Image (cartoon, rainbow, N blue to C red):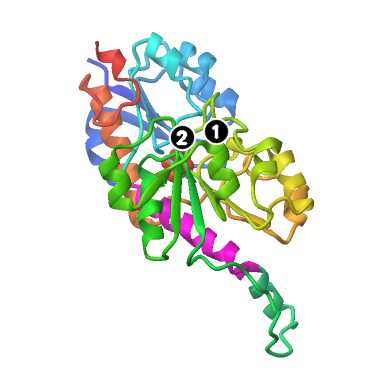
């Protein structure tokens, strides 16, 4: 019997692929940039297993061209780059890597929130530019976390981990999610459920933790910014597409909100001529929410485990379309 063929769309961090090599011929895309769409389309014609990243568009055409594909394994928890409906229709399980990146992403959210509240990036640039002449009572004033209200939009694993971090800062915590959580969880974290409009109008910090879908695309738009406090700060470590970038630019320029800290943008990478990059009240990092050595190694391992399970026709340990097994 011929060995299974696998394509991995980028070199994986810190991972032993010996078990995968025992059962499959593995080709890895070694470039820094993702494989161009035309190359991906060509590669998938021959393969049984695909290990991909959120930068790969695994759309209907790719999936329908991949006639021998048995498994799609994504090294990320989000999978909005994959046409899961087409994969399901073709009986292909799609794997992801939930759980292991929760704390790393919540940590970065917290780092951005604090950096934006206390204007850390501006302050650091100020020092390097030689502008630090004296201690001044009004120099680089920011916002207190203590006593403020944090609004968490989307309350899955990462949203909850962010809520746990807020406990130590004496913040009031509001959350909005499609489904209200059990009272026991609300009580243990000291939370209040709020409709989105209430959360937006009452929060000093609004942090986004929803997945990107038709329902959440541009959820934060002109109307949302109109509701927000002029002193509010928006943090996004989820997906860029949840925020309408033009509305954000208007809100920041017109002082409808005080600032934003974004680890994700729409598009990614953010174009260098984006007006957002000209504003001082925005911090932008390059989608590094899960970027710790330990977390990325765990994500890669989970993705490989899903891939191997799929090649061996076993249930994926972490599958987003379990319907394929019914
Ligand atoms: C994910 O996993 O979806 C993040 O965006 C990258 O770690």
Report, in whole angstroms, how far the alpha carbon at label 1 lies from the one at label 2: 7 Å
As helix, strand or loop, the secondary structure at mark 1 comes to loop
Which label number is shown at residue 9?
A: 2
Residue located at (46% from left, 34% from top) = 9
In magenta, the rendered stretch is 100-121
Q: Which of 28 and 194 is in front in this view?
A: 194
Question: What is the chief secondary structure element of the magenta stretch?
Answer: helix
| Cβ at disc 1 under 8 Å from ligand 1 | no
Where's residue 267, x and y in %?
65, 38
Inspect the magenta stretch and tell me whether residue 107 lies in it. Answer: yes
Find residue 303 and name its label: none
**The magenta stretch spans residue 62:** no
Residue tagged 1: 35
Let me know if residue 32 appears in the view.
no
Mark 1 and 2 residues: CB-CB less than 8 Å, in contact? yes
Vertical placement of residue 242 versus 191, above or below: above
Q: Give the quadrant of residue 169.
A: bottom left
Residue visible at 41% across and 38% down? 76
Dot 1: within a 10 Å radius of its alpha carbon, few (fewer than 14), some, or many (20 or more) residues? Answer: some
């Amino acid at each position: 019997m011929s060995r299974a063929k696998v394509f991995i769309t980028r070199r994986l961090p810190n991972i032993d692929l010996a078990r995968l090599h025992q059962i499959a011929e593995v080709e890895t895309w070694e470039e820094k940039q993702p494989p161009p769409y035309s190359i991906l389309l060509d590669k998938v014609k021959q393969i049984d297993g695909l290990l991909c990243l959120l930068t790969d568009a695994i759309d209907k055409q790719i999936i329908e061209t991949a006639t021998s594909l048995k498994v799609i394994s994504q090294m990320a928890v989000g999978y909005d780059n994959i046409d899961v409906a087409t994969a399901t229709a073709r009986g292909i399980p799609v794997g992801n890597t939930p759980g292991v990146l929760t704390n790393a992403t919540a940590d970065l959210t917290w780092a951005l929130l604090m950096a934006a509240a206390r204007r850390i990036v501006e302050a650091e640039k100020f020092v390097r530019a030689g502008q630090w002449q004296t201690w001044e009572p009004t120099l680089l004033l920011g916002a207190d976390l203590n006593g403020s209200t944090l609004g968490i939009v989307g309350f899955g694993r990462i949203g909850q981990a962010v809520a746990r971090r807020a406990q130590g800062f004496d913040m009031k915590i509001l959350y909005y999610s499609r489904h209200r959580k059990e009272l026991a969880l609300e009580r243990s974290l000291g939370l209040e459920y709020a409709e989105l409009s209430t959360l937006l109008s009452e929060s000093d910090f609004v942090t986004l933790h929803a997945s990107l879908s038709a329902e959440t695309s541009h959820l934060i738009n002109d109307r949302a910014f109109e509701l927000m406090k002029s002193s509010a700060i928006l943090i996004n470590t989820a997906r860029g597409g949840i925020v309408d970038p033009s509305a954000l630019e208007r809100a920041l320029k017109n002082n409808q909100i005080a600032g934003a800290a974004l680890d994700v943008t729409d598009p990614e990478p953010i174009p260098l001529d984006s007006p957002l990059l000209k504003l001082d009240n925005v911090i932008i990092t390059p989608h590094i929410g899960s970027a710790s050595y330990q977390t990325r190694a765990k994500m890669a391992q989970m993705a490989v485990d899903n891939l191997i399970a799929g090649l061996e026709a076993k249930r994926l340990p972490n599958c987003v379309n379990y319907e394929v097994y019914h």
